[in-house]
Image: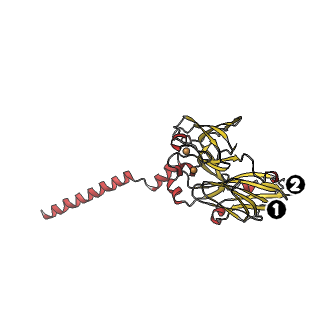
Amino acid sequence: MKQFKLLRGLVLVISALIMITAAWLAISPGSDEAEEDLTALPEAQRINQAPVSPVIQRDGNVVRIEMTAQRTDIEISQDVIYNAWTFNGIVPGPVLRVKQGDLLQFTLVNMDPEMPHSMDFHAVHAAPSRKFIEIMPDEQGTFEYSADTPGVFMYHCGASPVLLHVANGMYGTIIVEPEDGYETDHEIDQTYTLVQSEWYAENDLDDFQHGDPEYVVFNGDDFSLKEKPLLAKVGDKVRLYVMNAGPNHVSSFHVVGTTFDRVYLDGNPQNVLYGMQTVLIPAGGGAVVEFTVTEAGDYPVLTHQLNDAFKGAIAILRATHDGQDHGEPTMSH
Ligand code: CU
Ligand code: CU
């Protein structure tokens, strides 16, 4: 009798163990299965919408801007494709140039069939709860605001959670030209726009929060501005419109081999600094930097947070005697 009880107890324990194991197997994907789920996604479920050009039309001081929110594959490093959330299918989004005092009539067309998106312009005064609102999938919205403050401003999607939308690629630059220009306008020979930003594991909110990016880049990838340098002539005064989209890191913006004759913080002609070596650009901030290249050669443009430079945030500015690229070897830094 005692033996029978013992046996029955053993059978009960074993069957309970079997049930627990079966339940655990059912709810927890095996490591092989998990990997398969991530990588074996059918192509059709990966949304890759061809880039759509923005519409920008001026009528007096009214500027009508139409942009898309869309999902598009972006090459962020050689042969590394990121299925990005974008404005107009590019990262960073199109550079917008308006004049101080312009009225913007802005339309966002949300081509994304799955997710709401929005537009937050740092350059305007507007109640976010009314004018930076989320546009539902396959819908569009139009908003009006004026651009009264001159400078280099970030724009980005503000749909919740913002970190997810910005880290996935939804940002760009709007330059509001000062009404009376900058006092150095007549000295400038070359202008370029640079956007610094970070790339993390694709669409991985945990990774975005940890703030340790895989790549830190200028203008969307870590190779284009090394293979095709920015060009200038020896003796040129160069102006860079720089914006740091983050989402998490500041930029310690620096050009090797020169000093900044002038820096306009956030691009405002009243925020002028002279003779700087490095300018701190916060995430969500900008600057206009001006400098002279006095000798022929390659000048690395980078963030002096050197771990971020190492992860890709170096562009090359090449000064030659005629301003053309003669394919000199790229310096390493
Ligand atoms: Cu978005
Ligand atoms: Cu913002």
Q: Quadrant of residue 51?
A: top right
For the residue with label 1, is its CB less than 8 Å from the closest atom of ligand 2?
A: no
Label 1 environment density (alpha carbons within 10 Å; few <14, some 14–19, many ≥20): many
In the picture, measured across the screen, residue 10 lies left or right of residue 233, that is left
Seen from the viewer's position, the closer of residues 22 and 254 is: 254
Front residue of this view, candidates 251 and 226: 251
Q: Can you see residue 272?
A: yes
Circle 2/circle 1 CB separation < 8 Å: no
Would you say the beta carbon of the disc 2 residue lies within 8 angstroms of ligand 2?
no
Marks counted in the figure total: 2
The three-letter code of the residue at mark 1 reads Gly
Name the residue carrying label 1.
297
User: What x and y, as percent, mark residue 315?
Assistant: 72, 58
Residue 229 seen from this side: no
Disc 2: which residue? 322
Q: Quadrant of residue 227?
A: bottom right
Secondary structure under tag 1 reads: strand
Q: Residue at x 47, y 54 (%)?
A: 32
Specify the farthest residue to the right: 321
Q: How is the image coloured?
A: secondary structure
Mark closest to the chain's N terminus, 2 or 1: 1
SS class, disc 2:
loop
Residue 197 x/y as whole percent: 62, 55
Q: Residue at x 40, y 53 (%)?
A: 28
Percent from the top left, x then y, of residue 231? Answer: 80, 54
Classify 10 Å Cα crowding around label 2: few (below 14), some (14-19), many (20 and above). Answer: few
- For the N terminus, the quadrant is bottom left
Structural distance between the alpha carbons of marks 2 and 1: 12 Å
Please state which amino acid type lies under the numbered disc 2: Asp
Residue in the picture at 62% in, 47% down: 123
